[in-house]
Amino acid sequence: MEVILIQDVNTLGGKNEVVKVKNGYARNFLIPQKFAVEASPSNLKQLNERLKVQKKKEDAMMAEIKSVIAKLIEAPVKLTAKTGTSGKIFGSITTVMVARAIREQKGYEIDRRKIHLPDEVKELGTYKAKVDFANGNEAEVELEIAAEA
């Protein structure tokens, strides 16, 4: 019997997959537990419609991500920090500070956990930070660290 999985099942496959299983397994376990529905022509048609809608959403999201990446790499993000006489920063630049600067300068809200800084930013200068987005997309953002006036 062919069934359409409604949610991920470890031994069978992922959500929205059509799999072939034994009749008893489908009727006694998968369907009553709401893990799957029978692969009837109407259910297959609904699955195809759901997949089309999901594909459109993913395409729109990818277009949005690409536009955000383009804006992020367009110009450097400027940060200021308190420094000593030798040019060393008191403390260090954190991902929270970078996320706040991106929000203020570029207008995008980026989760601080998606920002990866090089080792430690403790001196003035220019640095590169990586921002991870969905589906393996990432942007390399240039950071300019200047002394606070």
Image (cartoon, grey):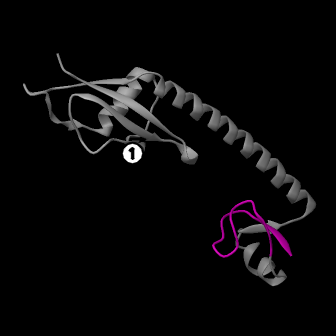
Residue ranking furthest to the right: 41
Instruction: Judge left or right: residue 38 versus residue 99.
Output: right
Residue 124 within the segment the image draws in magenta: no
User: Where is residue 30, by image quadrant?
Assistant: bottom right
Taking 46 as reference, is 22 above or below it? below
Which x, y percent locates residue 36? 75, 68
x, y percent for residue 39: 86, 65
Give the residue at x 79% y 45%.
Answer: 52
Residue 127 as seen in the image, left or right of residue 29: left
Q: Where 86 sits versus 9, above or below?
A: above
Looking at the image, residue 30 lies above or below residue 148: below
**Residue 114 image offset from top left, x and y in percent:** 42, 43
Residue interval drawn in magenta: 1-20
Q: Quadrant of the N terminus?
A: bottom right
Residue type at mark 1 is Arg
Q: Is residue 25 toward the left or the right of residue 118 in the image?
A: right
Could you tell me which quadrant the C terminus lies in?
A: top left
Residue located at (72% from left, 45% from top): 54
Question: Which residue carries the number 1 mark?
Answer: 113
Q: Main secondary structure of the magenta part?
A: loop
Disc 1 residue crowd, few under 14, some 14–19, many 20+, Cα 10 Å: few
Task: Tell me the residue at 90%/64% (across/down).
Answer: 40
Q: Reply yes or no: does residue 17 show up in magenta.
A: yes
Residue 25 vertical position relative to residue 33 in the rendered view, above or below: below
- Identify the element where label 1 is drawn: helix
Residue, far bottom: 24
